Amino acid sequence: MAFQVSPGVLVQEKDLTRIIPAVSTSIGAVAFQATQGPLDEVVSISSEQELVSKFGKPNSTTFEGFFTAANFLAYSNSLRVVRVQNSSVSNATESGSAFVIKNTTDYQDNYADGSASVGLWAARTAGVFGNSLSISTCPSATVYEEASKTTVNDASTTVGDTVVTVSSASGISVGDIVNFGDEYEYRVVSISTNDLNIVRKEEPQYFGTSDSSGLHAVITNGAAVRRRWRNYWNKRRSLRSIWSSFKSFRR
């Protein structure tokens, strides 16, 4: 850099065109398709983490709009986002009917009073993300547990078998917990007529018969089959937890 050695005027020119303006207080808006979140509703977003939490991670369909929003949030903390509806999206419902419940306001105005045929339950989020919802109800003591639902009709079982034939599979559902007259319990993963395809109760939920270790022991032909609701043990653990908390509270 040159320095003057005598009095005079020094003229300097600076190029400021590439300086990023301060936009931390700027408000932006974007509308795009997303995998989850309310439809046709303006949502205030302040960070990329909140964007993912509200509208899901990007995929091959939503990436363009998502990264446009994420890029803006790298410089600002005030973005208004609207999830737009496409023709194929709908909410998962208990009735199986195709309904689009756009957002909480739409639900309260049009569905909260029991209007339409959505059934007892509907997913909060329209689209595939809402299909992960699973609801299991137990309306009676019989549904909760039946000590002698049917009997084993299989004289050739061996340790490791994943199929057990019973006299009647009527009233047994996929997910039920069954016992064949010994100390072990199994989860029903599929039913073919009177053949129960089973995995061990303690094995992971995603296990199929090809993954399972099957029967712990040979079962007796004619033994009574006990059937329990799929969430039988979850319910009992919840009750024990409540009782334990109650006793702690009393102390």
Image: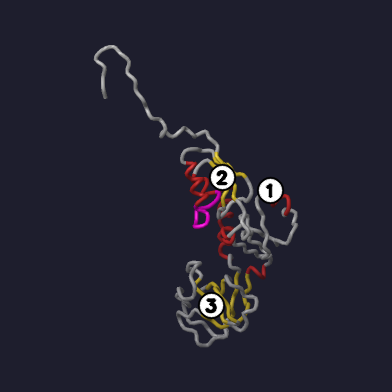
Tell me the residue that label 2 is attached to: 30
What whole-number distance in Å separates the C-alpha atoms at marks 3 and 2? 50 Å
Look at the numbered disc 1 and give the secondary structure of its residue.
helix
Dot 2 alpha-carbon crowd within 10 angstroms: few under 14, some 14 to 19, many 20 or more: some
Tell me, for residue 197, which label it has, or none: 3
Mark 2 or mark 1: which comes first in sequence? 2
Q: The magenta stretch spans which residues?
A: 54-63
Please give the name of the residue rendered at 63% of the width and 77% of the height, measured from the top-left corner: 149
On the image, numbered disc 1 is attached to which residue? 105
Sequence-first tag of 3 and 2: 2
Q: Earlier in the sequence, mark 3 or mark 1?
A: 1
Callout 3 secondary element: strand
Indicate the position of residue 36 as horizontal and vertical percent values: 57, 54
Measured as percent of width and height from the top left, residue 111 is found at 72, 54
The furthest residue to the left: 5
Report the predominant secondary structure element of the magenta stretch: loop
Quarter of the image where one finds residue 171: bottom right
Q: Nearer the viewer, residue 46 or 68?
A: 68
- In the foreground, 198 or 61: 61
Q: Tag 1: residue type?
A: Thr
Measured along the vertical axis of the image, is residue 103 above or below residue 13? below
Q: Distance between the residues labelled 2 and 1?
A: 21 Å
